[in-house]
Image: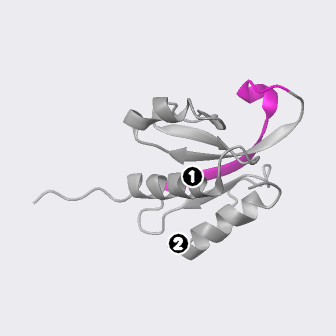
């Protein structure tokens, strides 16, 4: 996944969940949110981030996708190339995935699915 990664992520969300990206911040037009339709919770946040803010070498920015993650998995996942502690989110429950080709597309889609499941509405107790 490289230059068209944003389009691929958005296409996947549309095909899999019928969800289109939202752009909630006028001053940040490159930042997009994927939000569940049933409870309006975010399950993914797409944004360009300065590589220096992520502790990455080289100058410039990189596109990242923040997704919710099971806290039991975050530590193991962050050992994988291209998966970092969440930028600007709760680092126990979210991870940042580099969309620069480091993480295979299938893995990105699997993490999107996991995030979607983790943000489903709470079950009511009877």
Q: Nearer the viewer, residue 45 or 126?
A: 45
In magenta stretch: residue 45? yes
Residue at the extreme left: 126
Please give the range of residues in magenta: 41-57
Q: Quadrant of residue 7?
A: bottom right
Nearest-to-viewer mark from 1 and 2: 1
Above or below — where is 72 with respect to 116? above
- Residue shown at the point (70%, 60%) measured from the top left: 23
Q: Quadrant of the C terminus?
A: bottom left
Q: Nearer the viewer, residue 44 or 9?
A: 9
Q: Residues within 10 Å of mark 2 (few under 14, many from 20)?
A: few
- Residue shown at the point (34%, 59%) measured from the top left: 121
Report helix, strand or loop for mark 2.
helix
Image disc number at residue 16: 2
Above or below — where is 42 with respect to 69? below
Q: Residue 25's spot in the image, x, y percent?
A: 72, 53
| Left or right: 99, with 76 as reference point | right
Question: Is any part of residue 22 visible from this angle?
Answer: no
Residue occupied by mark 1: 107
Name the N-terminal-most of marks 1 and 2.
2
| Left or right: 80, with 37 as reference point | right
Question: Is any part of residue 8 visible from this angle?
Answer: yes
């Amino acid at each position: 996944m490289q230059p068209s990664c944003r389009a691929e992520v958005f296409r996947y969300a549309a095909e899999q969940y019928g969800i289109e990206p939202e752009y909630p911040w006028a001053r940040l037009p490159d930042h997009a949110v994927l939000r569940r339709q049933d409870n309006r919770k975010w399950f993914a946040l797409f944004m360009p981030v300065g590589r220096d803010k992520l502790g990455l070498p080289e100058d410039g920015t990189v596109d990242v996708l923040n997704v919710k993650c099971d806290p039991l998995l975050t530590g193991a996942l962050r050992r994988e190339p291209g998966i970092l502690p969440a930028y600007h989110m709760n680092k126990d429950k979210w991870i940042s995935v580099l969309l620069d080709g480091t993480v295979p597309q299938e893995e990105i889609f699997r993490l999107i699915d996991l995030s979607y499941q983790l943000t489903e509405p709470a079950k009511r107790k009877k």
